[in-house]
Amino acid sequence: MRVLALTHGPDVRPEVFGDVIEDDGHELLEWDILARGAPTPSAVDAVIVLGGAQNVGEELEHPWLHEEYAALRRWVEDGTPLFGICLGAQTLAHALGARVGPVGATLAGFYASELTSAGEHDPVLGVLPQRFEAFNANGYRFDVPDGAVTLATGPTPQAYRVDGRAWGVQFHPEVRREQVLRWFEAEKSLARPLDELAAELDEKLETWQEHGRRLCRAFLAAART
């Protein structure tokens, strides 16, 4: 399959998801919307939309957000399998009419989360344990769009599904350690000390990355059906 990864800058690439895509023999196409604008319609089999430092509501500063919303609506309407992570889940929710806004205190680290009954039976999110610790690095959150299905809950809504072909997750299942530490070093309002967050990553990241690999493979399998 040809998998498009839509990114929002050089430090929010597909990482662990990219490894899985290429290791499993698929073609990974990375597209940085900041540098290139929204991708033109092309023949891709699935789309992953990554996170970023930008936010819904900052369209004057980042006018390309309008292009992203339009692209997301087009992919949903076309039935293109879609997986949005953090900002990608938030722009998808906004494009479908849901509220997106600040969390309050920025989420940083691992948070107790659990699948809903629908999540347990979902072909993608259902590969996760019913209760799990999800890695979050979020200043904004989404409401689940009307007509979508809530798949996981936690400190905020953690995951949803739209029309059986599009998924959005608030958490980051794709991350690497040094990447995350760079994010936190640049964050001015961390609620926890950086060394405490680094120690938590050392303790929990290996298990979380394995969850991420399973999640990515489940999405790719769903995209083929």
Image: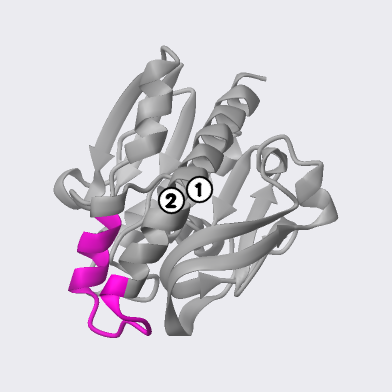
Of residues 98 and 13, the one nearer the viewer is 13
Q: Percent position (x, y) of residue 173?
A: 47, 48
CB-based contact (under 8 Å), mark 1 and mark 2? yes
Q: What's the distance in space between the residues labelled 1 and 2, CA to CA? A: 5 Å
Q: Is residue 46 above or below residue 207?
A: above
Residue 65 versus residue 215 in the image, above or below: below
**Residue 60 percent coordinates (x, y):** 25, 75
Give residue 32's position: percent from left, percent from top: 23, 44
| Foreground residue among 150 and 131 | 131
> Which label sits on residue 208?
1
Query: Label 1 sits on what residue type?
Result: Trp
Which residues fall within the magenta stretch?
179-195
- Which image quarter: residue 137? bottom left
Give the residue furthest to the top: 25
Q: Residue at x 51, y 72 (%)?
A: 141
The x, y position of residue 194, in whole percent, is: 27, 74
Task: Inspect the image, locate mark 2, and give the three-letter code of the amino acid beneath it.
Answer: Leu
Rendered residue at 24%/76% (across/down): 187
